[in-house]
Image (cartoon, rainbow, N blue to C red):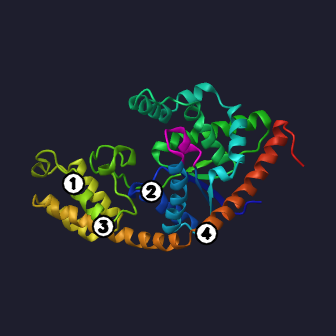
Amino acid sequence: MITKQRVLSCIQPTGGLHIGNYFGAIKNWVRLQNEEKYQCIFGVVDLHAMTMPYRPKDLAASTTNLVIELLACGIDPEKSILFIQSFVPQHTELAWILGCVTSYGELSRMTQFKDKADQLESIGSDHFVSAGLFTYPILQAADILTYRAQFVPVGKDQEQHLELARNIAARFNRQFGDYFLEPQPLYTETPKLGSLGDPLRKMSKSLGERHYIGLFENEEYIRRKVRSAVTDIGDEQKSGVISAGVENLFNILKSCGAHDIARQLHDEFVNGNLKYASLKEATADALIALTAEFKEAKQELEKDTATISRQITRMSQRAREIAEGTINDVRKLTGLPILV
């Protein structure tokens, strides 16, 4: 019997973490795992990463690296379960079963599928839109429902996927009996961090190097990227209107906890005498101070990768035990035999 409220959240291994990942998700994960009322399960979903073009050796390396970075950011194996998705085959088994109670129409309306399909088509004829890309929201629902999670931390751009998971759970329950919880969103305040190169767009690695700040980048790269960040494109400061680029730098500064210098610089902006070089320098300083601890922790972890491998295997096994119980129940409900 679950005495704590179970929280499930996952992340794809598509390269190293950037500050948008940290402030948008990972910082919240660490907070949730430290609250007594929650049992937190976090996943590195490597199977999802296969829906877009990739190189096998890069996927393996990115998966291992992401596990290390999550641990360096404060995910605690003593408080949370951190698993690798492909180590828990029950996810894919449940995804097939759930696919049989998911309508084609629901999948065709998923906006992220349309966005990624358009992205693939723009790359060129060597790439195609796979069936996996079309059906991955079902696997995403299986990620959640495998653990019968009560809550899923989400941002506004993920609401559609969680709603699909809720719909699938409800349809399964109507057809086979009341079993799955309908997972609820766990909304948290997260800063809206834009691209440094195009602040009207969300910070993303897919936009290119100049558009994001890596959480484990060295000081020189951080300063270089912040110095080249887009600020005003006209006379915004003279008119007293804050531009998207300047606002983005203030958001980053405040997210890092540098509230005093942010207030001081904002007063200078209001008075019309803010020097953008000062804002950029302060932002870079705050980012370097924030990331120093994470980089040091990662360096320590990388000294003993054998221990990390044992930890992730052990935690994935704990996840697999939970998932096996769910699959056995689902098999009984749906008329599938159980291996004894």
Q: Residues within 10 Å of mark 2 (few under 14, many from 20)?
A: some
- The type of residue carrying mark 3 is Glu
Nearer the observer, disc 1 or disc 4? Answer: 4
N-term mark: 2 or 4 = 2
Q: Residue furthest front?
A: 57
Label 2 – label 1 distance at C-alpha: 21 Å
Label 3 – label 2 distance at C-alpha: 16 Å
Residue 53 is covered by the magenta coloring: yes
In the rendered structure, which segment of residues is drawn in magenta?
46-56
Q: Nearer the viewer, residue 120 or 231?
A: 120
Residue 39 is covered by the magenta coloring: no
Side (left or right) of 186 relative to 203: right
N-term mark: 1 or 3 = 3
N-term mark: 1 or 4 = 1
Give SS at disc 1. Answer: loop
- The type of residue carrying mark 2 is Gly
Write down the quadrant of residue 249 in the picture: bottom left
Which percent across, then down, holds residue 135?
60, 34
Q: Nearer the viewer, residue 234 or 74?
A: 74
Q: Which residue is mark 4?
A: 306
Give SS at disc 2. Answer: loop
> Which label was assigned to residue 228?
1
Write down the quadrant of residue 48 in the picture: top right
